[in-house]
Image: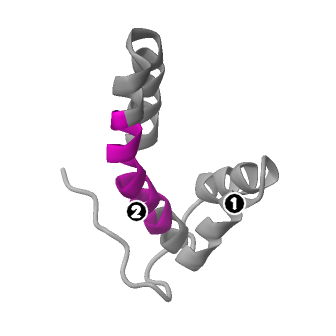
């Protein structure tokens, strides 16, 4: 959900003002990395996989595929799964 909302905001800011878009992008880069690493841990992969994004085009697509996979059931190497809140 974070990525979707961030992407929509980024697209809107590009059309409004490129300077504001640049500042917003700098503010969102660390939370985006954190969300991606957390998702990789949910699929029982190391957070170092995020470095694959440095490979042009193919790296980003591969990370997207890894993040779209179903998470491991129960506990994994990186700890217990977060319980959904109602």
User: Which of the 4 image quadrants contains residue 62?
Assistant: bottom right
| Image vertical order of residue 75 relative to residue 56, above or below | below
The residue carrying mark 2 is: 34
Mark sitting on residue 54: 1
The percent position of residue 59, horizontal first and vertical second, equals 75, 56
The percent position of residue 80, horizontal first and vertical second, equals 36, 81
| Image vertical order of residue 64 relative to residue 17, above or below | below
Q: Nearer the viewer, residue 1 or 69?
A: 1
Mark sitting on residue 70: none
The percent position of residue 9, horizontal first and vertical second, equals 38, 24
User: Which of the 4 image quadrants contains residue 22?
Assistant: top left
Crowding at label 1, few (<14), some or many (≥20) Cα neighbours within 10 Å? few
**Numbered disc 2: secondary structure:** helix
Q: Earlier in the sequence, mark 2 or mark 1?
A: 2
Side of 16 relative to 40 (left or right): left
Q: Nearer the viewer, residue 30 or 85?
A: 30
As drawn, the residue found furthest toward the left would be 86
Residue depicted at 40% across the width and 27% down the height: 21
| Image vertical order of residue 45 relative to residue 67, above or below | below
**Numbered disc 1: secondary structure:** helix
Asked whether the viewer can see residue 9, the reply is no
| Image vertical order of residue 52 relative to residue 25, above or below | below
As drawn, the residue found furthest toward the front would be 19
Residue depicted at 44% across the width and 27% down the height: 10
As drawn, the residue found furthest toward the bottom would be 77
State the quadrant of the N terminus: top left
As drawn, the residue found furthest toward the top would be 16
Q: Which segment did they paint magenta?
A: 23-38
């Amino acid at each position: 959900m974070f990525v979707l909302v961030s992407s929509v905001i980024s697209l809107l800011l590009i059309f409004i003002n490129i300077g504001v878009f640049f500042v917003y992008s700098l503010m969102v880069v660390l939370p985006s990395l954190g969300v991606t690493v957390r998702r990789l841990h949910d699929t029982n992969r190391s957070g170092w996989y995020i470095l694959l994004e440095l490979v042009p085009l193919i790296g980003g697509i591969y990370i997207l595929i890894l993040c779209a996979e179903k998470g491991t059931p129960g506990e994994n190497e990186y700890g217990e799964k977060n319980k959904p809140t109602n």
